[in-house]
Image (cartoon, rainbow, N blue to C red):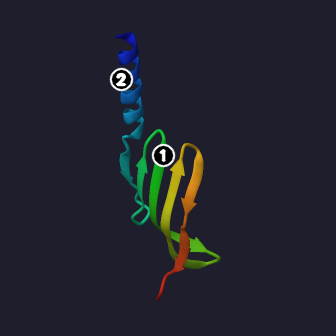
Amino acid sequence: MRKKITVTAVIVLFLIMLISIKTELKDGGTIKYSAILYGITKCHSMFTKDGVDGYNIGTEVRILFFNVYDDVKFVPDEQ
């Protein structure tokens, strides 16, 4: 009986760690999904690089404390 309770508690704790919180940043449209075990950031932020205005656009994926995917690129503003 005690083993079933322990297994159930571990499964529930793991599922709680997977629940993410959505955060919309006010930097041009970046959205972050943050959980204890992972994080996903869909970047669309205004940025200035070497005096050229533009946007950082792309996706970052973090599992635990390591970045496993990062394709964020600077796209110059076309004016």
> What is the x, y in percent for residue 67?
58, 53
Q: What residue type is labelled 2?
A: Thr
Question: Residue at the bottom extreme?
Answer: 79
Question: x%, y% of residue 40?
Answer: 45, 54
- Would you say 52 lies left or right of 27 here? right
Q: Residue furthest right?
A: 50
Q: Which residue is drawn at 55% across and 60% down?
A: 69
Task: Name the side, left or right, on which 4 lies relative to 73.
Answer: left
Residue at left offset 47%, top offset 38%? 36
Amino acid marked by disc 1: Tyr
Which residue is painted at 40% across and 59% down in the image?
A: 26
Q: What element carries label 1?
A: strand
Looking at the image, which is closer to me, 74 or 27? Answer: 74
Q: Is mark 2 in CB contact (under 8 Å) with mark 1?
A: no
Residue located beneath label 2 in the image? 8
Quadrant location of the N terminus in the rendered image: top left
Which structural element holds mark 2?
helix
Instruction: Locate residue 29, reporting x and y percent.
Output: 39, 64
Residue hosting label 1: 38
User: On screen, 3 above or below 45?
Assistant: above
Q: 10 Å neighbourhood of mark 1: few (<14), some, or many (≥20)?
A: some
In percent of the image, x 40 and y 40: which residue is there?
18
Classify 10 Å Cα crowding around label 2: few (below 14), some (14-19), many (20 and above): few
